[in-house]
Image (cartoon, helix red, strand yellow):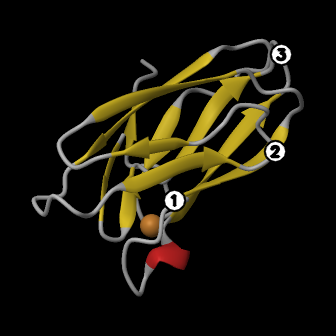
Amino acid sequence: MTCIRSHFVPDNIEGIKMGDVVYFHVTNLEQDWDVPHGFAIKGANNAELLIMPGETQTLVWKPERSGMFPFYCTDFCSALHQEMQGYIRVSPAGSSVPITFSTGTNQPKETTAK
Ligand SMILES: [Cu+2]
């Protein structure tokens, strides 16, 4: 995943299933040295990331229930900081929902499922 003012790419993710361990590798693409971004998942038990420009950090997450989880920037980055967010949908274990992700729409354009 990448982040730059003021969005994450991708910002809609589904196909994660209960029991999965999810690794978010988040890269801050900012060119200005003083614009860190944060990354947190609502309800997660781990702390958020603080990612400096040019840096990549990893957050490991194990969902504790199925459903929708917002994720969001935790470091004020611009006037549009509050819009810097997205959604992850976690499906029940064993479901057949393929991994899909998209940006700025809920219509998946890309998929890793074949
Ligand atoms: Cu922000």
- Ligand 1: quadrant of the figure: bottom left
Residue 72: image x %, image y %?
57, 58
Outermost residue toward the left in this view:
31
Q: Are marks 2 and 3 in contact (CB under 8 Å)?
A: no
- The answer to whether the residue bearing label 1 lies less than 8 angstroms from the nearest atom of ligand 1 is yes
Q: Nearer the viewer, residue 95 or 25?
A: 25
Q: Quadrant where the C terminus lies?
A: top left
In the image, residue 55 above or below residue 71:
above
Residue 13: image x %, image y %?
55, 42
Q: Which residue is mark 3?
A: 93
Outermost residue toward the bottom in this view:
79
Q: Which tag, 2 or 1, sits closer to the chain's start?
A: 2
Q: Is residue 111 left or right of residue 35?
A: right
Q: Nearer the viewer, residue 108 or 64?
A: 64
Q: Which tag, 2 or 3, sits closer to the chain's start?
A: 2
Categorize mark 2 by other alpha carbons within 10 Å: few (<14), some (14-19), many (20+).
Answer: few
Q: Quarter of the image holding residue 54?
A: top left
In the image, residue 114 above or below residue 99:
above
Q: Amino acid at mark 1?
A: Cys
Q: Amino acid at mark 3?
A: Ala
Using the numbered discs, state the Cα–Cα distance from disc 2 to disc 1 in whole angstroms.
14 Å
Q: Which residue is mark 2?
A: 43
Q: Which residue is mark 1?
A: 73
Q: Quarter of the image holding residue 94?
A: top right
Categorize mark 3 by other alpha carbons within 10 Å: few (<14), some (14-19), many (20+).
Answer: few
Q: Is residue 68 left or right of residue 26?
A: right
Q: Quadrant where the N terminus lies?
A: top left
Q: Amino acid at mark 2?
A: Gly
In the image, residue 5 above or below residue 94:
below
Residue 17: image x %, image y %?
73, 22
Q: Give the residue at x 24% y 37%.
A: 55
Q: Tell me the SS state at disc 1.
A: loop
